[in-house]
Amino acid sequence: MIELLGRMLRGVRAGAHRSPLANGAFAAPTTITVTSTAFADGQAMQASSAGKGVGDNTSPPLRWAGPPPDTRQLALLIDDVDVPLPRPLVHTAAVIEPSVDGVAAGALQPGCAGIRFLRADLGHHGYAGPRPIPGHGPHHYRFHVFALDTVLPDTVTTAKGLLAAMRGHVLARGTLTGTYQR
């Protein structure tokens, strides 16, 4: 039944153009390189990275390089642009100290040194892996890393608050895209 619903909704997708990250407030040079040893840009993510009830919800290993020297903080956002909703869904939101240049597999969870997790769209803190509707086709999960020229206050506690606080403070950005389907 759920797979039938997924097939019926196959053409209904939020789209990258509806992302709050698509507007000019986040325009910046794409000088940050984001990589993973678990998948190449545009390739399929491992089943172990899929969300609770689908996979092990183990975040993939990530590395980033190229933030400008005057970076005061980094922001990480993971979104799904293919959800059948009016806008992409933010799976993970975090503020990262500029000395951190990556995370090991499974490390995107509260308690990870140098990373403060914010409440994402589904109300959780930490990594929330892919859980697309069965039969909906491949979903694109974008791992965005932003270099910021300011330190964000501790009062920023949600993905929506992070987006508002980042406006006008993005020095550089980079993106790695992984796909997943059920």
Image (cartoon, helix red, strand yellow):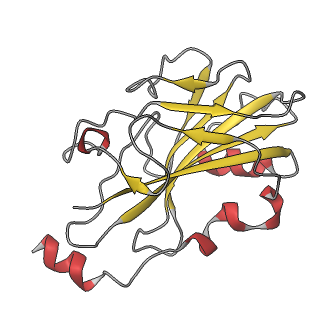
Figure quadrant of the N terminus: bottom left
Q: Quadrant of residue 146?
A: top right
Figure quadrant of the C terminus: bottom left
Q: Position of residue 128 (x, y in %)?
A: 39, 42
Q: Position of residue 75 (x, y in %)?
A: 68, 38
Q: Is residue 123 above or below residue 127?
A: below
Q: Position of residue 179 (x, y in %)?
A: 38, 57
Horizontally, residue 24 falls left or right of residue 158, namely right
Q: Nearer the viewer, residue 159 or 145?
A: 145
Residue at 45% x, 47% y: name it.
40
Q: Quadrant of residue 138?
A: bottom left
Q: Position of residue 161 (x, y in %)?
A: 69, 47
Q: Nearer the viewer, residue 51 or 143?
A: 143
Horizontally, residue 102 falls left or right of residue 145, namely left
Q: Quadrant of residue 181?
A: bottom left
Q: Nearer the viewer, residue 58 or 93?
A: 58
Residue at 25% x, 38% y: name it.
48
Q: Is residue 74 above or below residue 26?
A: above
Q: Is residue 111 above or below residue 150?
A: above
For the image, the number of numbered tags is: 0
Residue at 78% x, 32% y: name it.
152
